[in-house]
Image: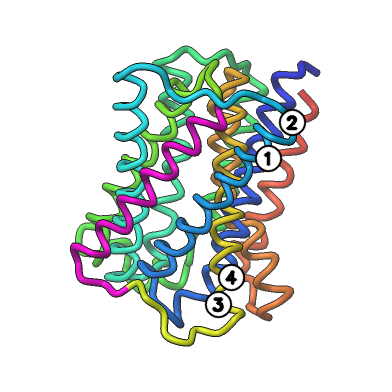
Amino acid sequence: MPQEFLIAVGAGLGGMLGWGLSDFFAKKTIDRIGDTVSLAWGHIFGTLALILMVLYRVFAQDVAFTWPQGMNPWLLVIIFGIGQAAVYLFVYKGFGKGQVGVLNPIFASFTGITAILSILIFKEPVNLFMIVGLIIIFIGVILLSVDLKALRARQISFAHVPGFKEVIIATFLAAIWTLLWDKVVGGKDWLSYTLCMYAIMTVAIIAYAKLMKIKLALTNPGKAIWIYLFLIGFCEVIAYLAISLGYSSTTYTSIIAVLSGAFSLPVIVLARIFLKEKITRAQTIGSIVVILGIVFLFLI
């Protein structure tokens, strides 16, 4: 099995676990301090974690840190940082307006859009078996995200679903971001590009909070909240580092995108174990389908 393929699968799984754990810890803070405040503080801690990783790499491993060189790379990093912040803010705004169970599968579809565009436009090298494996995983991702009761209650009338407009914008932004971030970091220093993009995203989120007059100062939140906020940022950084490493080292964009998009799987498992949340039939089937799809990829 090619090493490049294994790196891509590992990067996708890293993204899945990182974003999944980040979402799980966010469940602990959003109800207490709000989504935008959780998002801002999580990214502040994530930026600090990235800076510490860079310092460790430079001083402990004696690896030179390379900033993006030239105006164009910096412009791209700024655009992608602001763009990813926009994805988060549109998703949160949409979820705040409507039912997450209805809107979540729409947003989850960005991974499939990314895979299709990568294969059709950028001629990503894939074979029939790989395509079948990606389709299996994508079906599992949608099942993990769907809430059949909520859909039946809405009678699938998406044109009138509150929050649909914001989430569909976030979906296409996420698909384009994921597809093109691969081209930005390809062959580059993935750690430095991730740090710069992530820091700019953090600044953009804080700027939005200030613009909307959302207070970021926390009054006696408790030690546990601070720990959860740090874990939100740290786990999210793991996800971004994983996919950036995968994109810079491999050509398997679709595998990384679809696998990392299955971040609902660890959230569901952890919520069941620690929060005693019930798993729906669709989520159970989706979990099995995702695992089968991953196994199928390794059998290629």
Question: Quick check: 218 above or below 259?
Answer: below
Residue type highlighted by circle 3: Ile
Query: Could you say whether the residue bearing mark 1 is in a helix, strand or loop?
Result: helix
Within 10 Å of the Cα at label 2, are there few (<14), some (14-19), or many (20+) other Cα atoms?
A: few
Question: Quick check: 92 above or below 289?
Answer: below
**Which image quadrant is residue 28 in?**
bottom right
- For marks 1 and 4, give the CA distance: 23 Å
Residue 228 numbered mark, or none: 4
Dot 2 or dot 3: first in sequence order is: 2
The magenta region covers 190-215
Query: Could you say whether the residue bearing mark 2 is in a helix, strand or loop?
Result: loop
Viewer-nearest residue: 11 or 61: 61
- For marks 3 and 1, give the CA distance: 27 Å
In the picture of the structure, the residue carrying the numbered disc 3 is 225
Task: Tell me if I can see residue 139 in this picture.
Answer: no
Contact, mark 3 vs mark 4 (Cβ under 8 Å): yes
In the picture of the structure, the residue carrying the numbered disc 2 is 61
In the picture of the structure, the residue carrying the numbered disc 1 is 56
Task: Tell me if I can see residue 214 in this picture.
Answer: yes
Residue 140: horizontal and vertical position, in percent? Answer: 60, 49
Discs 3/1, front: 1
- For marks 2 and 1, give the CA distance: 7 Å
Residue 150 included in the magenta stretch of the image: no
